[in-house]
Image: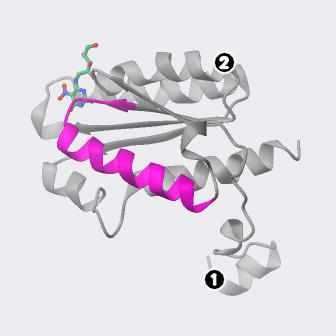
Amino acid sequence: MSGESRRAVGVDPEAHLAGLDGSGLRVGIVAGRFNDAITTVLVEAAIDRLASFGVARRDIALEWVPGAFETPVAAKWMADLGFDAVITLGCVIRGETAHFDFVAGAAATGALEVSLATGVPVVFGVLTTETREQAEVRAAVDGHNKGAEAAETAVEMVALHRRY
Ligand code: INI
């Protein structure tokens, strides 16, 4: 989309982050232990980014589950408890599993279903990649990190939810 088109519909690619205030928000994080060298980096980046928006550490609940497949049900438990948003984090690598499509698909569909059923934003931060290298690129300590992106999405969606 060109800059002109963005302006025509009122979209500024950076504006969604300006002025977001996470203070007082309660955010759940559900993370899969599978591929934990990568998911740990996602979790740390998500917590850091939430904190950068003013979310208090005591208002972030982190729970670990065995793998990405288990993230939706734990997200449902948290959503039902009244968290403002839940972030699911995990790492599914196609080359390492014969049931990639089942695990990745269930994690994605499950997150969406919980979100729609509860009205609580459930942010899908599960990496689904062909290779471990691709996952590492998306879970960089000081660079592109899908955990940090998921945290931004959570805060943005809560702000939107409060307007509707
Ligand atoms: N879980 C993951 O999070 N990532 C994977 O790559 C993966 N592989 O390769 O199989 C994986 N499997 C476990 C799955 O999430 C469940 O924990 C398991 O099937 C029990 O329900």
**Residue located 50% across and 50% down the image:** 150
Q: Give yes or no for contact between labels 2 and 1 (Cβ–Cβ under 8 Å).
A: no
**Which residue is most to the left?**
96
Q: Residues within 10 Å of mark 1 (few under 14, many from 20)?
A: few
Most foreground residue, 78 or 52: 52
- Quadrant of the image occupied by residue 13: bottom right
Percent position (x, y) of residue 83? 66, 29
Magenta extent: 31-53
Compared with 20, 74 (above or below) is above
**Residue located 62% across and 50% down the image:** 55
**First of labels 2, 1 by sequence position:** 1
**Residue located 21% across and 23% down the image:** 99
Identify residue type, mark 1.
Ser
The label shown at residue 81 is 2
Q: Secondary structure at mark 1?
A: loop
Ligand 1 has an atom within 8 Å of the beta carbon of the residue at disc 2: no
Most foreground residue, 70 or 112: 70
Most foreground residue, 84 or 8: 84
Compared with 138, 68 (above or below) is above
Q: Is residue 129 visible?
A: no
Determine the quadrant in which ligand 1 lies. Answer: top left
Percent position (x, y) of residue 85? 63, 36
Compared with 14, 99 (above or below) is above
Percent position (x, y) of residue 74? 48, 18
Quadrant holding the C terminus: top right
Residue 40 located left or right of residue 75: left
The label shown at residue 2 is 1
Colouring: one colour
- Quadrant of the image occupied by residue 10: bottom right
Q: Is residue 29 visible?
A: yes
